[in-house]
């Protein structure tokens, strides 16, 4: 996207105004944002260097990337060094910052591969022997292991089991 920044000195109010304009259609720019700074703050930041000036012009609403910020800083420094100018326009196109990476695509040979063959292919896949067992096979695996009938029961069910066990013991006598 193309941008233009109009940087103006307002010496009556001792301010620096930056107007950001964005290209909405080819060749047509519209004002998208305006920020006003105290000239004292900008002058102090200029003396401290570009990094300080970038920090001074960045706000919550006016926060450009480093490349466009450097273009704005360059314009501010040019404007402040020339006492005969009241305004200056700088342009920036962030399309130049977009990195296009070309990747080579590997050609794949067309082979007659059937979808069913791909789905049925189990090479290299370990089978789970328990997966194919029936419920009766699983019971056979547990032979010899005593199961606690109360293991999977709720507390109320456990009371009923205990009561049934007591009643069964008394009827056996």
Image (cartoon, helix red, strand yellow):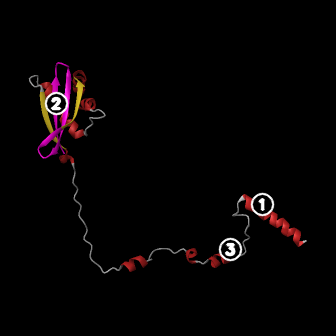
Chief secondary structure of the magenta span?
A: strand
Give the structural element (helix, strand or loop) at label 1.
helix
The residue to which callout 1 is attached is 159
Residue depicted at x 84% and y 65%: 166
- Of residues 154 and 46, the one nearer the viewer is 154
Residue depicted at x 17% and y 39%: 30
Sequence-earlier tag: 3 or 1? 3
Q: CA distance from mark 3 to mark 2?
A: 85 Å
Q: CA distance from mark 2 to mark 1?
A: 85 Å
The percent coordinates of residue 145 (x first, y second) are 72, 72
Q: Is residue 58 above or below residue 103?
A: above
The residue to which callout 3 is attached is 142
The percent coordinates of residue 51 (x first, y second) are 26, 32
* 118 left or right, relative to 16: right
Sequence-earlier tag: 3 or 2? 2
Q: CA distance from mark 3 to mark 1?
A: 26 Å
- Disc 3 vs disc 1: Cβ atoms closer than 8 Å? no
Q: Is residue 113 above or below residue 23?
A: below
Neighbor class of circle 3 (other Cα within 10 Å; few <14, some 14-19, many 20+) is few
Please tell me in which quadrant of the rendered image residue 156 appears.
bottom right
* Highlighted range, magenta: 1-30
Observer-side mark, 3 or 1, equals 1
**Residue 64 sits inside the magenta stretch:** no
């Amino acid at each position: 996207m193309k941008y233009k920044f109009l940087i103006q000195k307002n010496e009556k109010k001792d301010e620096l105004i930056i107007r950001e304009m964005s290209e909405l259609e080819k060749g047509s720019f519209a004002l998208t944002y305006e920020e006003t700074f105290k000239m004292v703050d900008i002058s102090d930041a200029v003396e401290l260097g570009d990094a300080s000036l970038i920090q001074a012009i960045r706000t919550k609403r006016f926060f450009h990337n480093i490349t466009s910020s450097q273009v704005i800083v360059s314009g501010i420094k040019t404007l402040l060094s020339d006492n005969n100018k009241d305004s200056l326009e700088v342009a920036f196109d962030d399309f130049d910052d977009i990195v296009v990476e070309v990747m080579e695509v590997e050609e794949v040979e067309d082979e007659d591969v059937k979808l069913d063959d791909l789905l049925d292919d189990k090479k290299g896949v370990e089978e789970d022997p328990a997966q194919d067992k029936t419920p009766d096979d699983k019971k056979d695996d547990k032979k010899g292991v005593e199961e606690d009938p109360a293991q999977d029961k709720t507390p109320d069910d456990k009371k009923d089991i205990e009561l049934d066990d007591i009643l069964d013991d008394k009827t056996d006598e």
